[in-house]
Each structure stands twice: as C-alpha cells, then as structure tokens.
Amino acid sequence: MKNSLHLEMYRRMVRIRRFEAAAVDLLAKGELAGGLHTTPGQEGAIVGACVALREDDYMVGTHRSHGHPIGKGASLRGLMAELMARSTGVNRGKGGSMHLADFSVGSLGETSIVGSGLPIATGAALGAQMKGTDRVSLCFFGDGASSEGTFHESLNIAAIWKLPVVYFCENNLYAISTPARETVSVEHIAARAAGYDMPGHVVDGQDVLEVYEVVKSAVDRARSGGGPSLVEAKTYRFEEHAIGLNHLSYREHAEVEQWRKRDPIALFRDRLLDEGVISRGDLDKAEEDVGAEIGDAIEFARSSPDPDPAEAFDHVYATTLETGA
Amino acid sequence: MSMQPRSKPGPEVAKLNFLAALRDAMAEEMRRDADVFVMGEDLRQNLYGSSAGLLDEFGPVRVRDVPLAEAGVIGTAIGAAMVGMRPVVDITISPFLYPACDQIISIAAKSRYIYGGQTSVPIVLRASLFYNAGSAAQHSDRPYQFFLGVPGLKIVVPSDAASAKGLLKTAIRDDDPVLFFEDFNLWSTSVRCDHDDEADRTVPLGRAAVKREGADVTVVAVAASVGLSMKAAEKLGQEGISVEVIDPQTIQPLDEETIFRSVRKTGRIVAVDPAHRTGSFAGEVLARVTETAFASLKAAPRRVCTPDTHIPFAPVMEKGLYPSVESIVDAIRETVA
Ligand SMILES: Cc1ncc(C[n+]2csc(CCOP(=O)(O)OP(=O)(O)O)c2C)c(N)n1
Ligand SMILES: [Mg+2]
C-alpha cells in the first residue's frame, strides 16, 4: 500500500517535470502560444499536498498551475491540448497555461489574478460543510499572494465558520523578482495562522513525504470538523518566473545552484532506493511510462482541431436568455 | 444614514412593499430549494429592512451574518456556488461592491468562460442604489453601468415591488451570476397585489416591460426613473403627446428588440437613468437605437441622467442632480418640438 502510494507520488512528480519540459520545448518550437509559468523545484510540495486529498476533494490553484491538476490526477491529454490552444483542451482553448483547471479531478479553477483563488477555496469548503459532505478544499497560493487582502479575509472567514479548508502556501521565496523577506512581515508565513486562531505548519517543500504527512493531518482534521489549517512549504523555483524572463538579476546564481542540489524528485528517488522501498527497475519503468504518456498527449493535441473562432461566443452564460419575445 | 422602517413578515398583504417583496422572494426560494441561502452584513437584525423573519424561519446556517470582508465574502459565495449552493449575498449599499470587484469581474463573470463551460456561478449579489438619501458621494453611487461592459454578468434593476419580487425569484433560480440593484427611493413604496397567486409570480430575466403604450415618443427608464417617467407621460398625455414607457428590468442582457420595435413606431427616444451621464446605460440604449433604428428616428435622441459631478451632501445641491418629472417632460418635449 505504502509502496504503491510512493510510486504514484514519484510518478506524478516526474509527470509534472516532464510535462513542463515538453511544454517549454513546444514553446521554443513555436507550437505553443502565450507564456508559461513553470514549477521545476516545486513538485514535491505540489504532489505531497495533492496526494493527501481524496479524489472527490476540491482544489484551487494559481497562475503557476500546470502541476496542480497533474498532482491531483488529471490526464495529460486535455492539459496539453489546452496549452496548444486546441478545442479538445480542458478549457476548450479559452484558458491556456494560467487557467489550466480540470474540474473532473476536483479543481475549481487556477486563477491568474494573484490571491483571487483563496476565497473560492474557502467557499467550496463552505458548500461542502452546508451540504453535509465531508469533502475538504485545498488552496494553493504563493508567498506573494499571502500579502493580498483575500488571503487574510479568507483565513478569517474559514476560522470563524470552522470550514474544512487547508491553505497551502508554496513559498518559493520570490514574487517574480521581489523577495518575500522584504515584503512579508513575518519570517514564516505559517506564523500568520496564529492571527486567525488556526494551526500553522512549516514544512520542507523539497521533501514530498514530509509535505504529505503534514497536509494529510491537516486534511484529516478539516474532514473531521476541526476547521482550517495553514501549511507553508519552503521551496524554490529552479527556472525564472516565466519562460523567457532570463535577464533578471534579483537572485544569486549560487543560491539557485544551492537549491538545485535539493531537487525534490532526485531526493525522493534516492530515498526510495536507499530504503529499498521501490526497486530501481520500478522507478525507471514509471519514468518510461510517463515519457510515453507525454508523447501520447502531444500527439493527441497536435491531431486535435483548433477551436472554431465562433466558439469565442460560447460559455459566456450558463443560461442564455430569450430577449424580446 | 437613514434606514427605512422595518417591513413586517406575512404574505397576506393586498399591497406589496418593495422591501417586503424582496424578503418574500428570498423566503419563498429558500423554502423551495434547500441550496438557497442568504448572507450579508447585519441580516439577522434586519438592519436594511429586507430580511425580516428569515433567521427565525431558516436559522443561522442559511441566514448568515458575515464579517466586513467584501472580497472574501463574495468570493466565498462564488466558491460555494461552484459546488452546488445558490447564495444570495446582500452587499447592502452598492459601493460596497467595489472592494470585491476582482471577485465579481475576474471570477464570477469569467469562470464559466475561462474554464470552457466546466463550471457555472449561480449567485445573486443584491446591492442598493442609495442615492437621494443625503449620504454624499461615497454612498450614493448607481454603479450598474460599470458592470455593463463585463460579459457573463446579468444585471437586474427593478422599478417596483411586484417586478422586484418576481425578478429576484428568477435571479435566484438562474445559473449565472446576477447583480441585482435595488433603488433606495423605492424601498418604502408599495404596489397593489390583487391576486394571491401573484405573490408567487416570477418575472423572466432579459425581458422588458412596456409600462404604458404610446405613439409619439419612446421613453426607456431604469429603477425609480420608471415611476418618474410614468408621471411625465401622464402629464404630457393631457397635452396630447402620447408617450410609451419601457422598463427594461434586466439591463444586461438587454431586451433591445422591444425597444427597437417601440422606436420604429414612435420615431423618438428618450432614455432616463439616475446614474452619471458618461458611460451610462442610457447612453448604451441611445447608441443601439441609433445604430439599428436610425432610419426611424424623427428627432435627435435625448437622455436624462445625472450630470458628471459627484453627489454632494447638502440636499439643496443633491436633489436637482437626478432625473425628475420636470426634466423628463422637458426632454420629451424637445423631441417633439
Ligand atoms: C493581483 C495581481 N497582481 C499582480 C500580478 C502579476 N503577477 C503575476 S505572478 C506574480 C507573482 C506572484 O508571486 P507568488 O504569489 O509568490 O507566486 P509565484 O509566482 O512565486 O508562484 C505577480 C506579481 C497578478 N497576476 N495579479
Ligand atoms: Mg513566490
């Protein structure tokens, strides 16, 4: 059991890494429009948190959200087709990289206005509570977003109503080029939980198992009526804020190199091998399978039609009104 | 800030008061559908007059007082709506929508679209148009026009108690986000409610109501301006000028066909709107009429709006800024001169 969960965690981390590498490659080849905010370095935080959820739990992402749907188990075809602006994309070509949300795995959106997802995750938790289900809502956000008013409003609302929500901060130390140490009033964002009378935890985001354990206990607590928690994963993005932005000089090369030595995928792989939990062959096979899935997703996207330009007018409303009858 | 007298619970009224109508609409929809709930500031105490008796009947889970956190509260309502609830948020006075504009514009209005139809956001945001109330510039806005340029929102501005009730019921049943603007100047007004079954009547969104038929001039008016326009029409009727008054009821999406049909008959249009002139709904009506029914026009279109200054506190400065029976009469006269 543990064995298969660990293998699945490994598979999802590799899937995120390879999926994004493929997307970057397609962007360079001109097969992909728009920008890409990628997550290499943060896969441990993402997968550790997602895997702590049940399949029917809710999740809200951010602008940097290729990893979140993959972490929650989404199939790659619809995601890749969306990045490639095809009609078969999860958003039917209307969202792209910053809004890559697959609702079939419990996503309620990946929003590109920083901080705007926090109230949505809070509301999903309210809905779950009012409907008497035991679903939990997981909210991803960044260190930058923790200074938005919506962060503070949401934590307060969740606390007073004891909502089943886990706020999960991927603190990658920067909001674009602005260091959190200059913009966040506390050393640990998790310390802000105290102001809202909820537990706050700091975890090593490069250690997928530690993230999993801590988020799992926060999820269990939420599910059993114990209310919200705030978890802060210390992590790092190895690449620039967005692909193509490589002229910025806000961080030292040495710092990046230091963090690259703590690659969450390599750390997890070494640990699994050290502990003899999973064989090298099984890990290699998982990587191979992921490679094939990505090839399949790209093929699927390439062979999918573009959206009809007339679809620009679809999905504005759920109910179109008959006027003037 | 002056509050209106509390409306009393009880449906068996021959006359339907505006605030009671809103309360009844919410109560009836909450009885009908367990997913409907209301949230807002000071709802339990019925501070604003449209939530009398709701707490007693439905309890604190479905009648929720909220913290002062408009973005958080509206966003929370959106999230709840995405997972199957039907929240009705009383934002009370409409400028209190502003701290939540990102949630309204970027999330409520766009989620269905940006996620390619994977979700919908059935929320109603109730907001009062608290003008002509001695409340000065920050409280007196009529901000529906700001949201007209946001596809995905439906915007309702009722003009009397009966239509307000039927429209609010329909808005609650609708699967899209609806902004529902309630004119403070109508709060204490009542309309006759002759039939029992009228109490349970719904009014479709997206349909205009022809409040009075006429042959010479079409007047399209919103909110309390509809009543003023009816008075103006009556006055001019005595002089032999026949005025048709149209209440769009829903200003987004707009029932433009009913307006075009009327203008093709009358050849003249006056749009009356208590909001600021620039960027107004009235301007949008005139633009559409001019584009589509230009050949039918016998006179230049006119609009009666609030001029582009802020709303001052002193009643002697405030009163004259809004459309009045006199200014509407003058504008209509100009079109037939
Ligand atoms: C409200 C808002 N302000 C500014 C931006 C521009 N912006 C996009 S991402 C970003 C940084 C966000 O930092 P953080 O929350 O730490 O997330 P990260 O990018 O590090 O994953 C900014 C400023 C935005 N999208 N939304
Ligand atoms: Mg960051």
Image: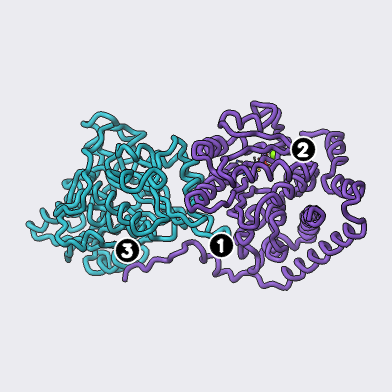
Chain colours: A purple, B cyan
Given the image, what chain letter belongs to the residue carrying mark 3? Answer: B
Q: CA distance from mark 3 to mark 2?
A: 55 Å
Residue located beneath label 1 in the image: B118
* Badge 2: residue crowd in 10 Å (few <14, some 14–19, many ≥20): some
Residue located beneath label 2 in the image: A204
Given the image, what chain letter belongs to the residue carrying mark 1? Answer: B
Tag 1 secondary structure = loop
Residue located beneath label 3 in the image: B204
What is the quadrant of the N terminus of chain A in the image? bottom right
Q: Compare marks 3 and 1 and give the one earlier in the sequence.
A: 1
**Residue A61 pos. (x, y %):** 64, 49
- Relative horizontal placement of residue B97, taking residue B225 as reference (left or right): right
Closer mark to the observer between disc 3 and disc 2: 2
- Would you identify the image quadrant in which residue B154 lies? bottom left
- Would you identify the image quadrant in which residue A119 lies? top right
Q: CA distance from mark 3 to mark 1?
A: 25 Å
Q: Which residue is at 77% across, 43% downward?
A: A240
**Residue A54 pos. (x, y %):** 65, 54
**Residue A124 pos. (x, y %):** 53, 50
Given the image, what chain letter belongs to the residue carrying mark 2? Answer: A
Residues marked 3 and 1 touching at CB (< 8 Å): no
Closer mark to the observer between disc 2 and disc 1: 2
Residue type, numbered disc 2: Asp
Residue type, numbered disc 3: Pro
**Residue B303 pos. (x, y %):** 28, 51
Residue nearest the observer in this picture, B168 or B250: B168
- Would you identify the image quadrant in which residue A84 lies? bottom right
